[in-house]
Image (spheres, rainbow, N blue to C red):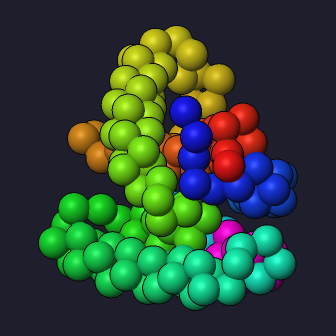
Amino acid sequence: MSLHITVQQALWFLPLALPICLWVIWSDLRAMRIPNKAVLSLAGVFLVVGLFVVPQPEYLWRLVALVVMLVIGMLANAAGMMGAGDSKFLAAAAPFVALGDFTLMMIILATNMIACYATHRLVRASPLSQLAPDWASWSSGPKFPMGFALGSTLVIYLGLGIAFGS
């Protein structure tokens, strides 16, 4: 298996994106909210680091992906399909994904979303939820903290980029 993201790109992006993704996961589980500061921080990492590790024509196309995903996310939010924070995070994460890895990324996202949903529901129904009894996601009814799946998906993708990148 070979990904289109380069090992060098993944090595630069992962250490900077990881703490932001963990912040997003924790915040969404705790408060069912993804902070704008986290989204802007993630976008800033790509804007700055990407200038040095992504070739210029590709860098610009990845910025187009950010805009496209922001528009799609806004439409999904308006239709009640996802939260505004989820939409913004998805847009900020989009440029980290090499365009040739889009299909693989969708497979990772779908698989990880199922795993995160099942894990969240199992933990919510178990005594483990008492380790963080004040987390809003435990009592959110049918709502699911998508930041859990979105943040971990980006981390998984970048980790695979280190292992299998071009």
Q: For the view shown, which residue lies furthest in the left direction?
A: 79
Q: Within the magenta stretch, is there residue 48?
A: yes
Residue 149 appearing in the image: yes
What residue sits 44% from the left and 49% below the top? 105
Residue 85: % across, % down: 46, 68
What residue sits 76% from the left and 50% below the top? 7
Q: Main secondary structure of the magenta part?
A: helix
Residue 160 figure quarter:
top right
Residue 75: % across, % down: 23, 78
**What's the magenta region?**
42-50
Q: Within the magenta stretch, is there residue 115?
A: no
Seen from the viewer's position, the closer of residues 37 and 96 is 96
Residue 22: % across, % down: 69, 48
Left/right of residue 111 with respect to residue 11 in the rendered view: left
Residue 111: % across, % down: 38, 32
Seen from the viewer's position, the closer of residues 36 and 69 is 69
What residue sits 57% from the left and 46% below the top? 3
Seen from the viewer's position, the closer of residues 62 and 164 is 164
Q: For the view shown, which residue lies furthest in the top direction?
A: 127
Left/right of residue 34 with respect to residue 146 in the rendered view: right
Which quadrant is the N terminus positioned in?
A: top right
What residue sits 62% from the left and 31% below the top? 132
Q: Looking at the picture, does residue 80 appear above or below residue 67?
A: above
